[in-house]
């Protein structure tokens, strides 16, 4: 998919652009209604953790966080050990 990269910020911004297009006033009202009917809307950034590296940083800009909130989303960080998927245990997608 064009625009999808290793950093979560870039991926989320691409997805937000698509969501914002669905919610725009000139968009198909049926598509917006389907979107608003969703009961779980979250960006789940998953990390499989291990012994290496011992630390790293990734963040989201204020602009991206505002856009997430404006679309009615939650931001979730999911940390799990090697071979364990915390997102699947929570039932998130």
Image (cartoon, rainbow, N blue to C red):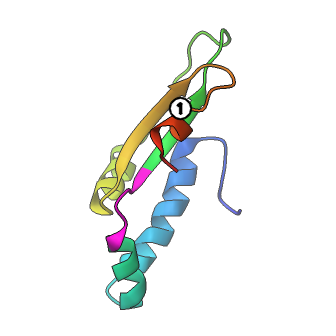
The residue that appears at 39% across and 57% down in the rendered structure is 41
Q: Does the rendering let one see residue 54?
A: yes
Q: Which residues are magenta?
A: 37-42
The residue indicated by pointer 1 is 86
Residue 40 part of the magenta segment: yes
Query: Could you tell whether 9 is left or right of 62 in the image?
Result: right
Q: Secondary structure at mark 1?
A: helix
x and y percentages locating residue 75 in the rendered image: 38, 44
Query: Could you tell whether 15 is left or right of 71 in the image?
Result: right
Closer-to-camera residue (30/24): 30
Closer-to-camera residue (42/9): 42
Relative to 58, say whether 67 is above or below.
below
Query: Could you tell whether 1 is left or right of 11 in the image?
Result: right
Relative to 72, say whether 83 is above or below.
above
In the rendered view of the protein, which quadrant contains the N terminus?
bottom right
Relative to 1, say whether 9 is above or below.
above
x and y percentages locating residue 12 in the rendered image: 51, 53
Residue 18 part of the magenta segment: no
Quarter residue 40 falls in:
bottom left
The residue that appears at 51% across and 46% down in the rendered structure is 9
The residue that appears at 66% across and 42% down in the rendered structure is 6
Q: Does the rendering let one see residue 27?
A: no
Name the magenta segment's main secondary structure: loop
The residue that appears at 60% across and 32% down in the rendered structure is 85
Quarter residue 29 falls in:
bottom left
Disc 1 crowd, CA 10 A, few/some/many (<14, 14-19, 20+): some
x and y percentages locating residue 2 in the rendered image: 70, 63
Closer-to-camera residue (89/50): 89
């Amino acid at each position: 998919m064009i625009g999808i990269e290793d950093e979560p910020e870039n991926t989320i911004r691409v997805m937000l652009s698509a969501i914002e297009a669905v919610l725009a006033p000139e968009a198909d009202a049926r598509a917006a209604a389907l979107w608003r009917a969703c009961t779980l809307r979250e960006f789940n950034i998953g990390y499989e953790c291990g012994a290496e590296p011992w630390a790293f940083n990734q963040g989201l800009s204020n602009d991206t966080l505002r856009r997430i909130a404006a679309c009615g989303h939650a931001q979730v960080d999911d940390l799990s050990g090697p071979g364990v998927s915390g997102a699947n245990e929570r039932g998130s997608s």
